[in-house]
Amino acid sequence: MAEICLLGTGGMLPLKNRYLTSLYAEYNGKAVLIDCGEGTQVALSHHGLKMSRIEIILITHCHADHVTGLPGLLLSIGNCSRTEPLDIYFPESAEKILKNIMSVCGALPYEVNLHKLPERSFTAFTADKIDPMLMISTIPLEHSVNCLGYKLILSKKPVFEPDKAKALDIPVKYWKTLHSGLSVRLDDGRTINSSDVTGECRQPLNITYITDTLPIDSIKGFAEGADLFVCEGMYGDISKKQAMNEKGHMLMQDACRIAVQANVKRLWLTHYSPAETEPEIYEEELKNIFNNVSISHDGDKINL
Ligand SMILES: [Zn+2]
Ligand SMILES: [Zn+2]
């Protein structure tokens, strides 16, 4: 089971009661962080999460509201006595800015591995450090600078069925190995395959994170069937649409339409403009487009 927390819901600038958009996803005691605006390390602490568990940081793009929290977070993690390497993934053209931002950290007590990601094509890689069954994939977005959306796909092992194991007279000491997907050879010479004692394959968990982009068509396929779709909704005020599109952003209503087209299970809106101090006022209208939309708030959590 994965524990997800939306650390902040603000875009551009933090407000008194609103940190900047960032997502924390923990699985088996290890976590992925997506984006790191100023104060992210404070938001982690505020929401009761352990920054020492972060193994991978994914950066969507190098605008201040998504990266300037990195020095503070990296230094805070250093204060937690971390010595194991930490990985940061980002759009390839952001390398210079990222290195400049991180240079203020000085020497850290652990290694930071930087990984450049293609900006014009989809890509995917396995997050072995967290779990070999966790895949991270990216989508090129349409913003004023190169920007990536991310999808966390966590494959699930099929359910172990003890009744099948008992019927085959398999000693309990082999059950864990069989559930992990391996075969075993019993003392009586029989070979038992994992599929002999497990149920049907389960749908992988899909968490899709999209922010700072025009509502481009490709998001629909990328977010298809997501268990949780976290998407920017910069404004609910549709009179802002043209000005907002010129800056490469989308409306809350755009995000809801994508959620419908992509057939996602739930949508959490985020990255509100500082001018949208009460995004809740749009909730009723938005539910008419996509019923399972949440006007998310800082600290919203879900176990999936
Ligand atoms: Zn932003
Ligand atoms: Zn931006």
Image: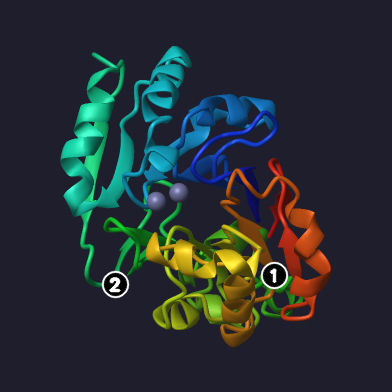
Disc 2 element: loop
Measured as percent of width and height from the top left, residue 56 is found at 39, 43
Quarter location, residue 286 = bottom right
Measured as percent of width and height from the top left, residue 5 is found at 64, 46
Measured as percent of width and height from the top left, residue 268 is found at 66, 61
Residue at the image point whose x is 61% and y is 80% from the top: 257
> Which circle marks residue 76 in the picture?
none
Tell which of 165 and 266 is nearer to you.
266
Tell which of 293 and 301 is nearer to you.
293
Residue that label 1 marks: 266
Does 80 sit left or right of 91 as displayed? right
> Which circle marks residue 122 in the picture?
2
Quarter location, residue 99 = top left
Residue 134 in view, yes or no? no
Classify 69 as above or below 147. above
Classify 198 as above or below 81. below
Measured as percent of width and height from the top left, residue 142 is found at 34, 68
